[in-house]
Image (spheres, rainbow, N blue to C red):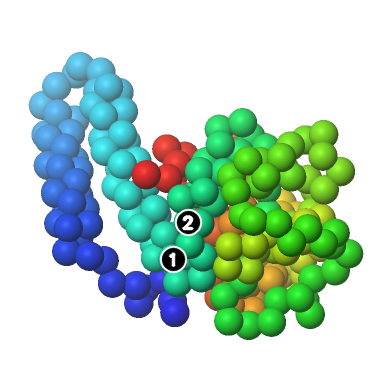
Amino acid sequence: MEISKVELPEEIRDMLKVQVNQLLERMLTLEKMIEETSCCILNDFEEMNAIFGIVHATAASHYLKTYLKPFTNEVDALTAAVQHLSNRRHGALIAIKRQDNVEAFIHSGVQIYAKLSYSLIEAIFYNGNPLHDGGVLIDQNTIVSAGNIFPTSKQYRGEQKLGTRHRAAIGLSEQTDALVLVVSEETGRISFAVSGKLYPVHPHGLV
């Protein structure tokens, strides 16, 4: 299932249309202001950026939750944990198993087999925890293992320079149908990888 094939519900689609139209109106207003005034328009740019942030966060949250819901009942716990890790700038790498065998592609993990909860996810990726540098594997509602090493992407050709976690997220998603969540330790930015592609979530986070 590709991102482009995920159909937006009518209420989400209508909301995004309204927000995009607001952006278009603001852009047209700004265009006129640039031509007709010498006033500083930085506040207007900031307002437009805030609207764009809401649009991005709404769309990203919908896509991510649509991918996760068929494979775990703990979507809220998982997204809450990722958001908390993002707020604290604690790096994280979390693979959610879908249909493919994932274990054959990861190495050196510590078996956990515990019920998925946001507190356990946060504890694993706490900076003092010896497992925080590796990846977590989730199967349905269970944290199977932590401290795993995921394969690094061999196909990424993007201009953006990516860190180890992001390359590992893309790498596992290239070889399996797993969805892999990433939190950047440097910026707190949330991303997720599917089918060898990395999709950023807006800095405003998940809604």
Query: Which quadrant: the N terminus?
Result: bottom left
Q: Residue at x 42, y 38 (%)?
A: 204
Q: Nearer the viewer, residue 162 or 111?
A: 111
**Type of amino acid at the residue the image marks with label 1:** Lys
SS at mark 2 in the image: helix
SS at mark 1 in the image: loop
Name the image quarter holding residue 167: bottom right
- Residue 24 visible in the snapshot: no
Residue at image mark 2:
75
- Residue 37 visible in the snapshot: yes
155 vs 4, left or right, is right
5 vs 23, left or right, is right
Q: Residue at x 63, y 41 (%)?
A: 119
Q: Residues within 10 Å of mark 2 (few under 14, many from 20)?
A: many
Q: Position of residue 44 (x, y in %)?
A: 23, 27
Q: Position of residue 150 (x, y in %)?
A: 77, 66
Query: Which quadrant: the C terminus?
Result: top left
Q: Position of residue 40 (x, y in %)?
A: 25, 18
Q: Position of residue 94 (x, y in %)?
A: 65, 57
Q: Which mark is residue 182?
A: none
- Separation of residues labelled 1 and 2 (CA atoms): 6 Å
Name the image quarter holding residue 184: top right
| Labels 1 and 2 touching (C-beta < 8 A) | yes
9 vs 93, left or right, is left
Residue at image mark 1:
69
Q: Residue at x 21, y 53 (%)?
A: 16
Q: Nearer the viewer, residue 137 or 49?
A: 137
Q: Residue at x 54, y 59 (%)?
A: 192
Q: Residue lying farthest bottom?
A: 100
Q: Is residue 150 above or below residue 115?
A: below
**Type of amino acid at the residue the image marks with label 2:** Val
